Image: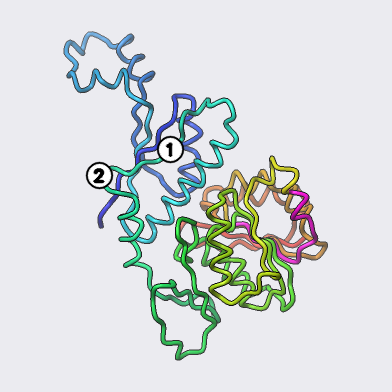
Amino acid sequence: MEWTEVNIYTTTEGIELLCSKLGDIGIKGFSIKDAEDFKEFLENKNGQWDYIDDDLMGLSECETCITVYIPTNGQGAEMLIAIKSMLAEMKAADTEGVYGRLEAEMSNIREEDWANNWKQYFKPFKVGEKLVIKPSWEEYDNSDGRIILEIDPASSFGTGKHHTTRLCLEVLEKYLNKGDKLLDMGCGSGILSIGAMLLGADSAVAVDIEENAAATAKENALKNNIPADKYRTYFGNILTDEKLADEIDDKYDIIAANIVADVLIAMKDSFRRYLRSGGILIVSGIIEERMNEVIDVLISAGFKDPEPEVREGWAAVKFNV
C-alpha cells in the first residue's frame, strides 16, 4: 500500500487536543515535532549527550507539527477530508489563535493531483438491500434494479466507502418511513440525506460547518433529481450560530449525524430540540472505544433504546426519543 504524508501545523498548546481528535477520526499513529519540547530537552539533558547533530538543533526553531500517514486511496481521501473539516472547526472556535494556523499540508505532492488520483479506487458498490452508490464519473449497469445514488464528493466527506457512512445508510434503510422529514447534521457530500430522499423521505435539511460541503451536497441532490424545494442546505456551526440554529428549527422525524464523538456529545441538546417525540436519532463517526461514552451521554439527555452497530472499529447507534 502507498502512503501520503500529511503535516498538520499547530502550537504546543494544540498538540494534546489535536492528537485526541485525530484518534476520533481513526488515526492512531503520528509523530510530533515541537520546539518547546526540544528546548526542554536541551535544558535538562544529562551527561549521556555530549553531541547533538546540527539537523536536530534546528528543531529548537521549528513550527510545531503533527505528522500522520494516510493511505493513497479512497479511504485516505475520506481521512484527509475529515482532518480538514476537524481543523476548520477548531479554527472557528479558536478566536484567539491559541492553536496556531491549524493547516494540513501534504508532502511532495500537489493536493489537486492527489485528489484526482484516488478516484481510481472509487467504483460503484452496493449498500444494504436497496441502494447502489455510483460515483458521477463511472457507468453502472443496473441489472438488479437497485436505487442508484450518484455522488461526487468533491472536497467533502462522504463517498459511502467509510464504514460509518455505510452503517448510517443501512440503518436509514431499515427505519425510514415514506414521507419522513430528515435533518442531516455534518452532511459532507450529502450522501445520507440524498440517500434518505431516494429511499422515500419527503424532505431533507443538510447542514455542515464547511461552505464547500453544503454546496457539494446541493449539487449532488440535483444530480439525483431531487427537487430544490425539498432539499435545503446550510453551512455554519449550530452550536455557536444562533441565527442558523433558529433557521433550521423544526421537528424532524429522523436526525442523522455522522461526525465525531466530541461533536455528537456537544450536540445532544440540539438533537432533542430538533427531533419530534417518537422520532429516531442515528449517530455515527464514532470509534468503537468511545461508543459507550456517547451512548451514556445521549441516554442522560433523554434518548433511549440504543441499538449499536459496529464494523471494523467504527460504530453507529440508533436511538428513540
Tell me where the magenta segment starts and ends, as one range.
Answer: 245-257
- Using the image, determine if residue 131 lies above or below residue 264: below
Q: Is residue 63 left or right of residue 143?
A: left
The answer to which of 52 and 187 lies nearer the viewer is 187
Callouts 1 and 2 close, C-beta under 8 Å: no
Q: Is residue 276 left or right of residue 61?
A: right
Residue at the spot 49% in from the left edge and 56% down from the top edge? 156
Of all residues, the one furthest to the bottom in this rendering is 143
**Residue 108 numbered mark, or none:** 2
Per the image, the residue denoted by label 1 is 103
Q: From the image, which quarter does the C terminus lie in?
A: bottom right
- Using the image, determine if residue 129 lies above or below residue 50: below
Asked if the stretch drawn in magenta spans residue 252, the answer is: yes
Residue 294 percent across, percent down from the top left: 63, 49
Residue 114 percent across, percent down from the top left: 32, 55
Q: Which amino acid type is shown beneath numbered disc 2?
A: Asn
